[in-house]
Image (cartoon, rainbow, N blue to C red):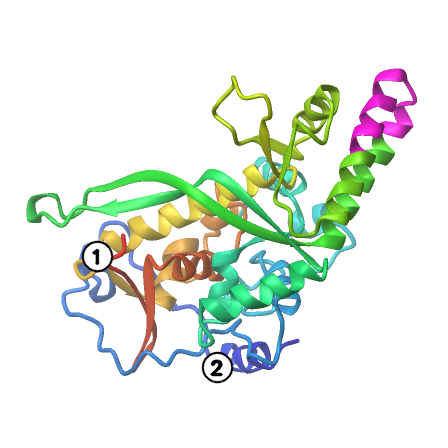
Amino acid sequence: MLPCQRVYQENVLKKSLPSSSPSSSSSSSSPAKENKEKLKVTDYNVQLDYQLSSKEDVVVAINTILTNRWSESTELHDKYRLNHLKGTSLEEVIFQIKNLSSSSKAELVTFRQSLPSGVVTVTQLYSIFHTQGNTFVDKSLELSIRRGIVRKFIISNASPVISRSLNAFQSKKVTYGFENVEIVALSKHFDKVIEESVNAMKAKNDEEARGVVSSLEKFHDFVRLNPQEMFISSFHFTEADISNLMRLGYITLTSNHFNEQESHYSIAYPGCGTFLKLVNECKIWLVKALNKTKYKELLEDELFRRWSGVNPEGDPKLNNFRKPYFGYDLHWVLADALGCGIIEVFNTPVGRGWRLTGKL
């Protein structure tokens, strides 16, 4: 466990969720939700619960995110009182959660199983090394990529560009577009995914499957020999190879010029689209939640309460475990948004605050 995680867990023991939560009818009278006054900023020298020092590398950072990305198993907090749940499988743990219907639990398990297990966004890494800055992360990534430890992927039109109107009469209007996003994974995780695909095809033992195996093995050799390469071209692979790799989600077409003799393809991590959709849905929720307040800011504890919902008895409603969030931990929603520059974090006398920035 990271030192910052131990400190945070000690703090958690001193805190709990509030004994009552504003109902929908009384939410407008709640000071926290009315946001009549701006939060008092004490400083911007914020220590995030998952933050690492420059002594650590991006491999540690990636593993930190992957280990703590689900709310029921994160070591960063126990806000939902679920860390005591134990089991040998995902199903065993999830089906112990109370306040979720059986259908919601089944849907959550199905979604989690479809999700790639080894990818994180570069913007999340920016937040983990918030003090050191983005250049530190970029240089560390480049070094790890050259060594073949980490692989980067560029996914086209995958991240929402969120705009907020500055006009007084449209102050709450939010519009969305999309831009490219960078994700990274440990090379050993990507290798394992390819090997699993190869083994699955070999088990079929027919002519078509053998052709797919050949394409996958050729592709695997290429990525191992070219750790920095994020694209391939039709010059290196046959038409059948390209078709097989696209169908399995290992490449996507990047060239829009279909009359060119040579087409270019982005190397992809299978299932990363599902992961990015999850991140985008969460980020849109965050922007809308902040945008509803007068000063576009909320305390972190209030964000966590809204993310989960709290019943009249003061217990978490676990709305964040339902579609489309499926238990993704809010820390990484905040981390991704902070790394993108669409929010900023600051200290207040009563805890961390988060605010939308002018970069929206």
**Which residue is located at x 19 percent, y 64 percent?**
35
**Which residue is located at x 17 percent, y 46 percent?**
165
Indicate which disc, 1 or 2, sits on the residue closer to the N terminus: 2
Q: Does the residue at mark 1 contact the one at mark 2 (Cβ under 8 Å)?
A: no
In the displayed structure image, the side of residue 246 where residue 169 appears, left or right: left
Name the kind of residue labelled 1 in the image.
Thr
In the displayed structure image, the side of residue 178 where residue 54 appears, left or right: right
**Observer-nearest of 339 and 353:** 339
In the displayed structure image, the side of residue 90 where residue 139 appears, left or right: left
Q: Which residue is mark 1?
A: 293
Give the residues drawn in magenta, as a range: 201-216
For label 2, the SS is loop
- Counting from the top left corner in percent of width and height, residue 167 is at 9, 47
- Counting from the top left corner in percent of width and height, residue 260 is at 54, 21
The CA distance from mark 1 to mark 2 is 28 Å
**Observer-nearest of 167 and 209:** 209
Q: Which residue is mark 2?
A: 14
**Observer-nearest of 256 and 122:** 256
- Counting from the top left corner in percent of width and height, residue 42 is at 27, 83
Which numbered mark, 1 or 2, is in the foreground of this view?
Answer: 1
Name the kind of residue labelled 2 in the image.
Lys
In the image, residue 107 above or below residue 161: above
**Which residue is located at x 89 percent, y 16 percent?**
207
In the image, residue 221 above or below residue 184: above
